[in-house]
Image (cartoon, grey):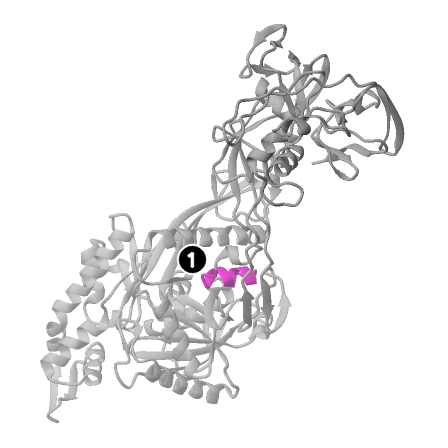
Amino acid sequence: MDTRREDKSGLVFGLDIGTRNVVGTVGYRDENETFNVVAQYCREHGTRAMLDGQIHDIGKVGKTIQVVKAKLEEMIEQPLTEVCIAAAGRVLKTVTTHVDYEFPEETIVTGEMIHTLELLGVEQAQNILREQNDTKYRFYCVGYSVVKYYINDEMYSNLEGHKADVISLDIIVTFLPEDVVDGLYSAVAIAGLEVANLTLEPIAAINVAIPQNFRMLNIALVDVGAGTSDICITKDGSIIAYGMIPYAGDEITEVIVQHYLVDFNMAEHIKRASTVDNEVEFEDIMSITHRVPSKEVWELVAPVVDKLAKGVAEKIIDLNGDKSVSATFVVGGGGKVHGFVERLAEELNIASERVALRGQEVLKTINFLQPDIEKDPLIVTPVGICLNYYDQKNNFIMVRFNGERIKLYDNSRLTIVDAALQAGFPNEYLFPRRGQAINFTVNGKQRMIRGEAGESSVVRLNGREVNINTPLEPNCEIEIIPSTVGDDAVYTIERLEEYTSQTITFEVNHKMVTCPRFVQVNGRLEPPAYQVKDGDRIEVRNYYTVAQLAEFMDVEIDPDQDILVNNRVENMDAQIYENFSVDWTVLAYRTAKEDMEQQETYLTGTSGEAVDMDAANDSEAAEQADPVSDTVVPEDGKEADDGKTAEQPQTAVGEAEEEAEEEPVREPVDRSVFVNGELIVMRGKPEYVFIDVFDYIDFDLSDSRGRAIVTLVNEKNAFYTQILEEGDEIVIRWEES
């Protein structure tokens, strides 16, 4: 069929699958835009396999289609493999919407742009219906009509070639439930056919019955079939509405069945014969032959004809904005029943000559190469179905997605993504999925840390690996293995730029000390290694307390001496800010490691076994004097410095505190160390701590610019009050966060 799309003289096969019969038409459109019907064949259903325009027995309808196909193949002497079909609007849904497309700058509108605009309208209508759908049905688009085009909010009949900043349209899109469409596809599949095009019956009929130049008028088209009466309204050059009522010719036939005691097929014969003959002859179920005047049949069905005319008229008025139309055209076999056209004119309150059956007069532009074809309202829709094929606006393609057969509205740009969305495959499963993110605030500003990305989905088309934007092929096999979820986000305070780049500097005993800022999480101080949690409120503080500064510097302050902050006496809870001066008296330098080791030695001894506490107390004096270090070691393991004595804690048995002996004065020594590979010699002190190094090197601690500082002693992380030994290798550098 793809060849036929390129070769416009190729044959097109159309089927009108009606409630009472199946009409097959084969033809082609020539270079003069004339459609030539090569062959046409009509076959009634053997049983009532369809009701009200819907297929009830797929197998029987499929067999009828098979007979029609075989007959046409015999007539044209070539096989038929694809077919165009139309659906009745039994459970029709319509959505009217407006869509705009704005260009970055003034642009000349092309046909491609117009097509894109129309597709945007269809997609928007699909979204609207999806939101409004309160039924169990899934709906498929079976057609659309543009009501109005606009350029920069001004109405135009044709946009192509004009310059525009914004193009817009009003569009009416029609939908049918999944089971209606599935039934049609399944029936033609039984006959060995694939669907080349699907449209709506009133759309097909209007292509023939109401030419484009007539559509400036406010006209209604009614396709009265056996089970449904489909309606569309035109105005100002466009189709403005679609609708239907769920009864038609079969309502009339049922009355004849009951009154004359005949089967349904005989009742159909009586109904049709009464419209052309003066008398009707028939046989009832008792095999008794009757001959009745046609007028008797007219009088019998008159109440049902009135009901049908009234229902159609009410629907037309409703679709036309609660007012009647200027004229109405009637097509379809059901519209030929006696009195219907006249009664419809009365119900619409328009002149009787403005309601007319459309048959031979609208088929003048159709060239019938088969001489025995009768040009009547019955064949308007079948021909329109073939003509609709050339518009290619309502085409569907079938694909198989992860083993499930699905239909897609073919806009000529379908990709695997479209199939995935139609199948309900979650969009997030197409792309790498991140782990759980962390949302928190820093100093009142919202912050989010994304989780790690997972693995991408694996997409295959007909067994070969492709990407999600690969174009679809009819009847292709699509397989998608969902993407995976990455690890959840993990984030610590020490990674915050506010923590690494913003330091705070104090003058302590006339020496500048630079410290990281403290961080509060949900009102509580947390260490740098704290893992941020979702919803945390983080505040980077711009001050220390005296106690916190002492803890950071690993020093023990003499509580009996004054603490001066900016030369004012303060206590350990005093808040100190950037560049504040602090003067205090240090009792001892300490480290957490030394505290732990001293305490462990005190409690367990060198052998690791518990020491008798009384024996430990008896040897107290010996412990206080360390002949190796010449320093005083108090019971809590803290060294004393600057000639001060450390306060002795109470022992485990509650003995009174004892004071340590004064430390002897130590002589200054030289200490040689390597800083970033360069030898420096420090002089003038009996002992040196890490922070002393900055007096001998050129390194600006305030020049962080968002970087973190790296400080190592012998390849291990350093702390500012760490005691340096001869030959220590020191590294001090900035590292990008």
Which residue is at a point 19% across and 72% down the rendered structure image? 251
* Picture quarter with the N terminus: bottom right
Q: Residue 734, how many percent across, how many down?
A: 76, 32
**Residue at which label 1 appears:** 144
Screen quadrant of the C terminus: top right
Would residue 648 be found to the left or right of residue 662 on screen?
left
Q: Nearer the viewer, residue 520 or 627?
A: 627
The magenta-colored residue range is: 411-425
* Residue at 20% across, 82% down: 264
> Could you tell me residue 237's position as x and y percent?
41, 51
Residue found at x 56% / y 22%: 657
How many residues crowd around disc 1 within 10 Å: few (fewer than 14), some, or many (20 or more)? many
Which corner quadrant of the image does residue 247 belong to?
Answer: bottom left
For the point 73% across and 22% down, which residue is it? 702
In magenta segment, residue 418: yes
Query: 245 left or right of 158?
Result: left
Q: Position of residue 581 (x, y in %)?
A: 66, 11
Outermost residue to the bottom: 287
- Name the secondary structure under disc 1: strand
Viewer-nearest residue: 594 or 262? 594
- Residue 498 lies in what quarter of the image? top right
| Observer able to see residue 378 | yes
Given residues 225 and 51, the one toward you in this image is 51
Judge whether 706 appears above or below 67 on screen: above
Q: Amino acid at mark 1?
A: Tyr
Q: Nearer the viewer, residue 155 or 537?
A: 537
Q: Is residue 735 magenta?
A: no
Horizontal placement of 662 versus 82: left or right?
A: right
Does residue 100 lie above or below 268 as drawn?
above
Q: Is residue 590 visible?
A: no
